[in-house]
Amino acid sequence: MHLAFYSVLILICTLMPVGLILAEEAKEAEEFISLTLENDLWGSGEDRHYTHGTKIGYLTTDVPEWLNAIGEQWLCDSCRDESAVEFVLGQNIFTPDNISTTELQEDDRPYAGWLYTGFTLYGVDLCNDKNDPMGCNSLKYDALQLNIGMVGPASLADQTQTFVHELIDSPRPNGWDHQLSNEFGVMLSYTRRWQNFIHSGLFDSLEHDLSPHVVGALGNIYTYVGGGALWRFGRNLRVDAGPNTVRPGLPGASYFVPKRGKGWYLFAGFEGRAMARNIFLDGNTFSDSHSVDKKPFVFDAQFGFAYRWENVRLTLTNVFRSKEFKGQDKSDEYGAITLDFAL
């Protein structure tokens, strides 16, 4: 199984000092640690295309002043009832279908890696109808995200995949000599999401919600606009912001309200994107590299299950992604496992 243990170790060791410093400054704040692993072997069972993603994050509701100043400029006035910031480190790995050959596969996507860090600033309007006798039956939030990092050999994707494949006695990837060149990458994205809670009418403790959203991203990594929706059905939806994912993907957050007892929900959603830039298909921005002709429109559909027990949430997700480039023989599928811990 193609788990990026080496990458996770690097990211945890890098993130822990940051988390300890922030925790010392925010003892009264709500804090969360999140780990997300995405892998194609948990979906289609094949080792191809978007083959692995690792993301580890630290979220706190004690937002530093310099980020609050950004929020005052960029987040809507009605989305400042509560705020939070999540700092992340991650690595994504992309390969063609055939990883055994050393030859350049001109008709398949390039080998590429993306090692990044960044933050997401959340602004939340907790309740649009504060006189509702049922309590807060709706909310909306803005999310402003900035990721920076490296594409190419500096992403360590070659070493990560090779190390793990040797560790688990899996076929060695032999085409990394053809990966994209080193390039500093930046991606700025903005998401607006509306969330409405509706009692199901079956049992008092069950409810469902529908959360439409719009999103835009700008940078040499990804540039796109999109939109979609997420539907959930389960228990205690009001204490949960939805499943956490690796971008591009449906918006969610590590945040939930720790309570004694249990909570759960089933979910299904979709997001469509009009892609102007995808470095992992278009190739390097400032130098010649392997590239393929990307499709201008991409569609994701996902479904899954989330279970919360007191201060821990486990989310299992399956994602179907439409064909991303011309000549791609079939769409992709991958799975995701996310663990969120309230400190």
Image (cartoon, rainbow, N blue to C red):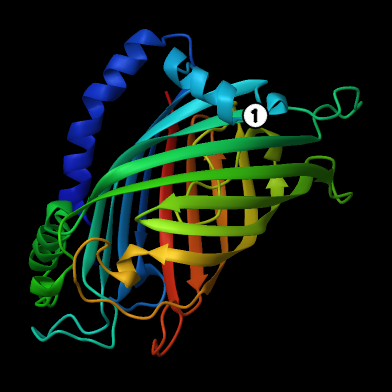
Type of amino acid under label 1: Val
The answer to whether one can see residue 73 in this image is yes
- Residue 269, position in %: x, y? 63, 61
Quadrant that contains the N terminus? bottom left
Q: Is 264 positioned to the left or the right of 21 in the image?
A: right
Q: Name the residue under label 1.
A: 124
The answer to whether one can see residue 246 in this image is no
Nearest the viewer among 92 and 281 is 281
The residue at the point 49 percent across, 29 percent down is 311
Label 1 crowd bin: few (<14), some (14–19), many (20+), radius 10 Å: many
- Residue 277, position in %: x, y? 41, 64
The residue at the point 21 percent across, 84 percent down is 98
The residue at the point 37 percent across, 59 percent down is 38
Relative to 170, residue 314 above or below: above
Q: Is 226 positioned to the left or the right of 150 in the image?
A: right
Nearest the viewer among 74 and 175 is 74
- Residue 157, position in %: x, y? 17, 59
Q: Is 181 positioned to the left or the right of 324 in the image?
A: left
